[in-house]
Image (cartoon, rainbow, N blue to C red):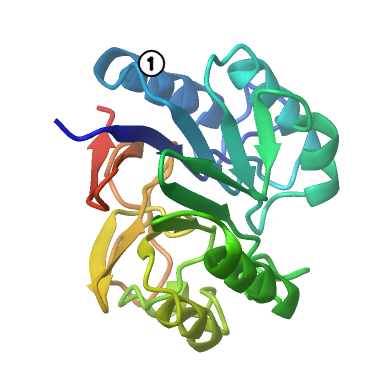
Amino acid sequence: MSIHTRLLQFTDCHLLGDSSSTLRGTNTWQTLQATLAHASTHQAPWDITLLTGDLVQDDVLGYRHIRRTFETSQVPVHCLPGNHDDLKGMSQQLSAAPFHLLGSFCRENWLVVMLNSCLAHSAAGSISRAELARLADLLHTTHHEHALIALHHHPVPMSSQWLDEVGIDNSEAFFAVLDAAPSVRGVVWGHVHQAFDGERHGVRLMGTPSTCAQFTPRVDDFAIDSKPPGYRWLHLHEEGALDSQVEWVF
């Protein structure tokens, strides 16, 4: 039996400072708790937690709820920002173990890189030259056989006009770095509030639904879907296989 690392990805929690408040009629604190309860029942144990952005809804007080939810975690919690996050606020609240902000880590023979795709004062994303250089350097100098890249914004079209206007604006540069690194096996993101699974040049591409409300797929204008909260599990196998699936909570 192959050795594998089990990761769980939770994304787009959109927490508010007041845990009783709602966003578009959804209590995001309650849906996060329901999502984590489902994961604990159906997926435990796992090795690493990924939080891939929009942890709060433009409210730095929401990070205290992230902290109290995950601070007793027995596994590392790796975080990156989304367009509704405040990087300074994240740094202040999520700086001590088990939290790790951005950066990268190695597990078995896998490298996992947490990228910052945020563009100041914009819902759209862009990966800076410095981040692209960091990614390229890690992929070419870190001792690993396989790599997974995590970020917030989607690097490929989602067949949704309004949503594709707020994706990454320099995807070609991003994929140029990946194309030069044969170790990359997968890319995973949030932001889109829906499930996506595709492939490009042998690299698996995965979008993950929110722990709160979802966006209706493949529509021109913004709309809320009836899908429940969700999250994703990923199994990184030592020989390079990547198994992954979205789990819906209700």
Q: Residue 48: x percent and y percent?
A: 47, 31
Judging from the image, what secondary structure is the residue with disc 1 in? helix
Q: Residue at x 66, y 41 (%)?
A: 56
Q: Is residue 118 left or right of residue 218?
A: right
Q: Which residue is mark 1?
A: 37
Q: Residue 62: x percent and y percent?
A: 71, 32
Question: Identity of the amino acid at label 1?
Answer: Ala
Q: Is residue 67 above or below residue 23?
A: above
Q: Is residue 94 left or right of residue 156?
A: right
Q: Residue at x 22, y 51 (%)?
A: 241
Q: Is residue 191 left or right of residue 61?
A: left
Q: For this rendering, which residue is in front, 58 or 85?
A: 85
Q: Residue 25: x percent and y percent?
A: 49, 37
Q: Quadrant of residue 194?
A: bottom left
Q: Quadrant of residue 124?
A: bottom right
Quadrant of the snapshot with the C terminus: top left
Q: Residue 181: x percent and y percent?
A: 44, 74
Q: How many marks?
A: 1
Q: Residue at x 42, y 26 (%)?
A: 47
The reply to whether residue 199 is visible in this rendering is: yes
Q: Is residue 113 above or below residue 221?
A: above
The reply to whether residue 125 is visible in this rendering is: no
Q: Quadrant of residue 65?
A: top right
Q: Residue furthest left?
A: 1
Q: Residue at x 63, y 69 (%)?
A: 137
Q: Is residue 156 above or below residue 103?
A: below
Quadrant of the snapshot with the N terminus: top left
Q: Is residue 124 above or below residue 195?
A: below
Crowding at mark 1 (Cα within 10 Å: few <14, some 14-19, many 20+): few
Q: Is residue 77 left or right of residue 219?
A: right
